[in-house]
Amino acid sequence: MKNKVLIIDDAAFNREMLTEILEKEYEILTAEDGQKGIELLETHQSEIGVVLLDLIMPVMDGYRVMEIMEDKGYLKHIPVLVISGEQAVAVERKCFDYGVTDFIRKPFDNELVMRRVRNMVDLFTYRNSLEDQVESQTRTLKRQYEMICKQADELKQQNEKITDILAEVVESRNLESGEHVKRVKSYTKILAEELMATCPEYNLTDEEVRIIESASAVHDIGKITIPDHILLKPGRLTDEEFDCMKSHTVKGCEVLDHIEGVWDERYKKYAYEICRHHHERFDGRGYPDKLAEDDIPIAAQIVSVADVYDALISERCYKKAFTKEQAFCMITNGECGTFSPKLMQCFRNAREKMENVSREV
């Protein structure tokens, strides 16, 4: 239980005041310089919920403390609230560059400190718990697959199971209902079947359509690596935040690689292609690899249309839902990026089926 607060400040008055503010809810550890603070961190890291850090101190200043915390990986699991008398914006920016969670200037308001500390502890407790759950579930899934890797029929069933579970992890992290993945799978199946019927040059089979449908569930698995303040941000993302969000395509493949050796090869191939390339665009303006036209794997192209369609007609934290008519026009008119003309014809042909799915799921 991370119920301890570590206060690192050379001023005894500040340590006493902060202790008085927080001691009703947290066990307090104090250090009068950075070196002693690091010693306490190394001893109590699993119990510390937040560090309150001054910048200007003897022996070891706050900047050095942040450097050590970053090197040791503490900043990933322990939030840091800098409380400093420094007034320059450049100082605050430098602290955030180090990876601190928040910054308060002295003199501080007692209630503000209490609320900031409570929010930070709750947020990191939730995030760390979720990460532990993901890691635990991934280990469990790997053990399950290792037990049945020689049994082809059971392996096929487990391949589908793992994608659904991983998709549920993403949906719970993204605070969504989980229906998004179900709809994307249904839209993917409809589009893939239409493409198989009208474009034989892609050599799709019923089995491949089934695998593509199932593998579509992991298209956003990389979002489990995106920080909450970006993933759940209700407003427009900054350029830096959007770059981080875009990385979910590559990081998702890294997640899949962690369960190396337990995938059916065809299944792994489609899951990897979908995960990495479902944001590529036919004109080469997508990401992460700026692939164009048929250099984009057809499975990723199919899931891309399915994903965009469902995103448009669904309400999200950053937008209202569009009508099905609006979504259809936006996609076919190129307002959501450029897609394959062949796939767009399949989309037109399958419009009624997809709209029926949106009502049922």
Image (cartoon, rainbow, N blue to C red):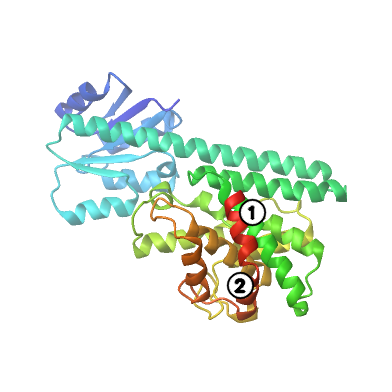
Please state which of the two labelled residues, at mark 1 or mark 2, is closer to the viewer.
2
User: In the picture, residue 243 is in which quadrant?
Assistant: bottom left
Q: Residue 194, position in %: x, y?
A: 71, 69
Left or right: residue 141 versus residue 52 is: right
Q: Residue 21, position in %: x, y?
A: 21, 24
Residue at x 54% of width, y 63% of height = 309
Q: How many marks?
A: 2
Left or right: residue 152 versus residue 324 is: right
Q: Amino acid at mark 2?
A: Arg
Given residues 290 and 51, the one toward you in this image is 290
Residue at x 47% of width, y 71% of height = 330
Q: Residue 179, position in %: x, y?
A: 57, 47
User: In the picture, residue 11 is in which quadrant?
Assistant: top left
Q: Is residue 287 visible?
A: no
Where is mark 1, residue-wise?
217
Given residues 28 and 108, the one toward you in this image is 108
* Whether residue 269 is situated above or below residue 199 in the rendered picture: above
Extreme residue toward the top, this view: 24
Q: Amino acid at mark 1?
A: Ala
Give the structural element (helix, strand or loop) at label 1.
helix
Q: Do the residues under discs 1 and 2 have CB atoms within 8 angstroms?
A: no
* Whether residue 121 is situated above or below residue 62 in the rendered picture: above
| Real-space Cα separation, disc 1 to disc 2, in angstroms | 23 Å
* Whether residue 175 is situated above or below residue 207 in the rendered picture: above
Disc on the earlier residue, 1 or 2:
1
Q: Is residue 193 visible?
A: yes
Residue at x 56% of width, y 45% of height = 178
Residue at x 27% of width, y 42% of height = 60
Give the structural element (helix, strand or loop) at label 2.
helix
Bin the neighbour count of mark 1 within 10 Å (Cα to Cα): few under 14, some 14-19, many 20 and up: many
Q: Residue 317, position in %: x, y?
A: 40, 50
Where is mark 2, residue-wise?
348
